[in-house]
């Protein structure tokens, strides 16, 4: 079975009643964990983006505190896992401000890692790539917000 385009889905959804749409949303939520997470964001977190960012940062801190430092392999693997999780949260939000804040926080936590991430080429590449993505997201924001993020960015680059 081939999926139809978003525009066709949108037209079809307009034809359904309110109760039918609720049933469709609940079916989607039961089908896959990511659908439930996206629905949770849309219903509960999207109205307060600052709180959403704070929750993501707390979860990031918790994940970094659980990192296995026995081997660089485990550190890299866990770091990539954390990054996948953050990218998923960024995709839910679709806001550049959220993306910049989350990626800068991730880079800051990566910079604090002991042993230092600079010891590994792969870890350094992850850090540089995410820093670049944060810069790109910051460049699309309003000038006042850009200034705040640039201060954070300079702190990361100078330390």
Image: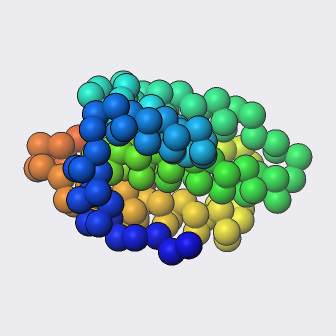
- Residue in the picture at 34% in, 31% down: 19
User: Which picture quadrant has residue 38?
Assistant: top left
Name the side, left or right, on which 154 lies relative to 122: left
Q: Position of residue 118 (x, y in %)?
A: 65, 61
- The answer to whether 90 appears left or right of 125 in the picture is left
Give the quadrant of residue 140: bottom left
Q: Residue at x 65, y 62 (%)?
A: 123
Residue at image coords 58%, 52%: 83
Query: Is residue 7 in view?
Result: yes
Q: Nearer the viewer, residue 25 or 16?
A: 16
Decide: is 141 above or below 66: below
The image's colour scheme reads rainbow
Is 158 left or right of 116, judged from the image as shown?
left
**Which residue shows up at 82% across the image and 53% down it?**
74
Q: Position of residue 145 (x, y in %)?
A: 18, 43
Whether residue 86 can be seen here: no
Above or below residue 44? Residue 110 is below
Q: Quadrant of the N terminus?
A: bottom right
Coordinates of residue 61 in the picture (x, y in percent): 59, 32
């Amino acid at each position: 079975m081939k999926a139809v385009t978003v525009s066709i889905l949108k037209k079809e959804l307009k034809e359904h009643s309110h109760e039918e749409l609720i049933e469709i949303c609940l079916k989607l939520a039961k089908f896959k964990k990511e659908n439930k997470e996206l629905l949770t964001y849309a219903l509960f977190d999207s109205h307060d983006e600052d709180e959403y960012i704070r929750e993501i940062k707390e979860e990031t801190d918790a994940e970094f505190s659980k990192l296995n430092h026995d081997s660089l392999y485990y550190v890299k693997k866990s770091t990539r896992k954390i990054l996948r999780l953050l990218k998923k949260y960024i995709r839910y939000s679709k806001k550049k401000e959220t993306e910049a804040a989350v990626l800068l926080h991730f880079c800051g936590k990566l910079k604090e890692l002991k042993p230092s991430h600079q010891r590994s080429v792969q870890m350094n590449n992850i850090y540089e790539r995410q820093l670049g993505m944060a810069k790109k997201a910051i460049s699309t924001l309003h000038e006042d917000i850009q200034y705040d993020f640039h201060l954070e960015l300079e702190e990361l680059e100078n330390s």
